[in-house]
Amino acid sequence: MLGIITKHGQQLTVPDVKGKTVKEAIALLEKAGFEADVRDSIFIDSIPPLAVWAQTPDKGATVKVGRTIYLTVNKVVAPMVKMPDLEGLTFRSAEMMLKSLRLNVGDTIYKPDFATNTVLQQLLNGKKIKPGTLLPEGSNVTLILSSGTGSIENPVPDFVGLTYAEAREILNASNLSAGTVIIDPNVTDTINAYIIKQVPTRKNEIGDFNMVRAGESVDFWLSATKPVKDSTIKAPEPEQ
């Protein structure tokens, strides 16, 4: 009688229920002579909600009749995670960090910059995303990466007299970046402060244009007061 009660010697092969809905999986297992129990849940963006992601014992295993098959199912709502700060990291480090948080690398866009293959910006749906912002697991994060400096040299733009906001627009259009920014203590509004000095300058000591490549940077000195460019000073008369 003990053998009959414990179903000694009666064994069955575990069917494959991965990918099925939890309702379908339980019905199939019970019909095959097993018990079913949802043991855990996980979020995978590539399979439908409430689909079976894993089963224990796995398909093909030979077990006793009535054995409980434990299921791991996909969550209905994606858990929220904090966006990390990826700027300045190498692409490989950024990719590993995203994967550890169950986030995905979306598009990768290259932009000239001196630090080759490092992250310059992080975007979500085309907009910059700040570190610490909550977003669903499985989100695709676009990375703007540095491709290194360009090979073509162009004259350095003249930024003196412009606001910092105007200068940044020219930097973006020229594929340049702001380097060190030194701000006068009297400045209360940085974006509308005036540039009174830049390095490299527009021209060198002998009057030739300084040249710069795409991806390089320009240092700025900012002031609350707009510099006056004196256009009344005449150039020296050439010698006879």
Image (spheres, rainbow, N blue to C red):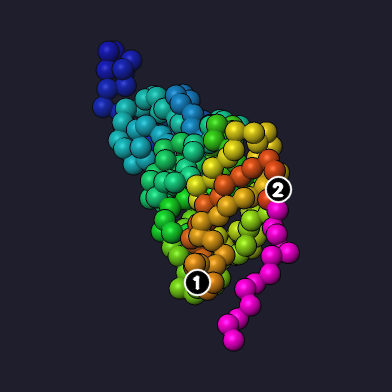
Q: Main secondary structure of the magenta part?
A: loop
Rate crowding at label 2 as few (under 14), some (14 to 19) or many (20 or more) other CA atoms within 10 Å.
Answer: some
Looking at the rendered structure, the kind of residue marked 2 is Lys
Q: Give left or right: position of 128 versus 20.
A: right
Tags 2 and 1 in contact by the CB under 8 Å rule?
no
Residue 204 vs residue 92, the one in the foreground: 204
Indicate whether 14 appears above or below 146. Answer: above
Residue 136 vs residue 97, the one in the foreground: 97
Q: Give left or right: position of 171 versus 35.
A: right
Whichever of callouts 2 and 1 sits on the residue coming sooner in the sequence is 1
The boundaries of the magenta stretch are: 228-240
**Residue identifier under label 1:** 206
**Residue identifier under label 2:** 226
The image position of residue 150, as x and y in percent, is 47, 69
Q: Is residue 233 magenta?
A: yes
Indicate whether 156 appears above or below 97. Answer: below
The image position of residue 5, as x and y in percent, is 33, 15
Identify the residue at the far top of this view: 1
Label 2's element? loop
Q: Residue at x 64, y 56 (%)?
A: 160
Q: Residue at x 58, y 82 (%)?
A: 239
